[in-house]
Amino acid sequence: MPTLADILTMLPELYLVASICVLLLIDVFLPKERRDVTHYLAIVIALVAIWLVFGNAAHGTLTAFGGMYVSDGMATILKVFILLAAILVMVFGRPYLKQRNLQVGEFYVLVLFASVGGMLLASAGSLITVYLGLQLLALCSYTLVALNRESPLSSEAAMKYFVLSALASGLLLYGMSMIYGATGTLDLGQIAGIIPNAAHPNLLLFGMVFMLVGITFELGVAPFHMWLPDVYEGAPTAVTNFIGSVSKLAAFGLAVRLLEYGLHPLVTDWQAILAALATVSLILGNVVAIAQ
C-alpha cells in the first residue's frame, strides 16, 4: 500500500495529473472567445510543478513505491528543464496556433501530459516506471503531431511516427523482458547488482542490444532516425519544438536510467555500441545534408 511519504515524494507528478484533468474540464466549458484562459492556466500549472520539484530536491535523494520512483539530483535537473521547455513551447506556439485556428485546449493538455511522461522517465527506478513514462510521452506526442487534422502531411507524419515508434517500443519491451529473465527483478538498482554474477550473460547482452534500439530511436540516432524528417516537417511548428526539446530531454533521462543505473556493469559493451552509432550519425547526417 502507498504511504503518505510515497505520495509526497511523487507530489509533482500527481499534482500535474490532477491539475491537467481540472484544466481539461475548465476548457470544455469555456466559450471560444475566452480560450486564452486555458493558455495562462497551463503555464501557471507548470510553474507550480517546478516549485514542487525544487521542494523535493531540498530533501535530497528520495525513493517511493518500493524504489519504482526515484527523486535525486539528476531527476530534479531534467524535470525543471522539461517543464521550462514545455512552458516555452506553449508561449511561442500560441501565435502560430492562433493564426491557423489550432489553438485548442487539447494542445496544452497533451503538452502537460507528455511532460509528466518525461518526468516519470527522469525518476524511473524500475523497468515498469520506464515503460509507463515512455508510453505516456509517446501517445501524447502522436496526437500532437496530428493536431492539424486538415493537413494530409500532418496526418501522414503522425501515422509514420506511430508505426515506427510502436516497433521501437516493442523492441525495448522485448529487451526488458530478457533483462528480467536473466536477473529476476525489475528494479534497476538490483539489476546492476545481479548482472556481474548472472547465470545467463548472453541473454543480458541480447536484452541490452534491444533496449539500445529503443533508446536510440527516441534520441533520433542513425540508423533509427528515419522518422525525424517526416515528423519535424509534418507536425505544427510548436509541436516540432516540443519533440526536439522535451522529448529529447526525456530520452536522455531514459538512457541514463537504463544504461548508467541499470546496466552499468555492461558499460564496456554499451559504450562501444553508442560510440559506433554516434559516429554513424555524424557521418551520415553530414553526408545526407550535403545531398539535400
Image (spheres, helix red, strand yellow):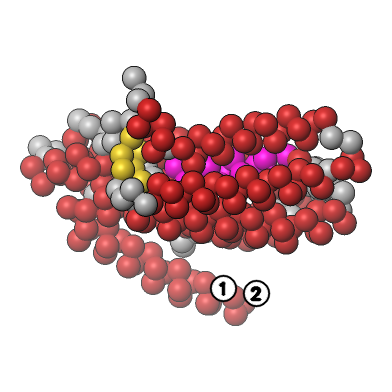
The circle on residue 288 is: 1
Residue span colored magenta: 106-120
Task: Give amino acid for label 1.
Answer: Val
Disc number for residue 143: none
Q: Secondary structure at mark 1?
A: helix
Vertical side of 78 occupied by 1: above or below: above
Relative depth, front residue between 234 and 257: 257
The N terminus is located in which quarter? top left
Whole-percent x, y for residue 261 in the image: 26, 50
For the residue pair 211 and 265, the one nearer the viewer reads as 265
Q: CA distance from mark 1 to mark 2?
A: 6 Å
Cβ atoms under marks 1 and 2 closer than 8 Å: yes
In the rendered image, which residue does mark 2 sit on? 292
Asked whether 192 or 1 is in front, the reply is 1
Task: Provide the secondary structure element on which disc 2 rests.
Answer: loop
Q: Is residue 197 left or right of residue 7?
A: left
* 266 versus 276 height, above or below: above
Residue at x 22%, y 43% (from the top left corner): 189
107 is within the stretch colored magenta: yes
Most common secondary structure along the magenta stretch: helix
Give the residue furthest to the bottom: 290
Q: Position of residue 46 (x, y in %)?
A: 60, 48
Residue in the image at 21% along x and 53% along y: 264
Question: From the viewer's perspective, is residue 49 above or below residue 199?
Answer: below
Left or right: 42 with respect to 192?
right
Is residue 193 visible from the viewing direction of this image? Answer: yes
Name the image quarter holding residue 120. Answer: top left
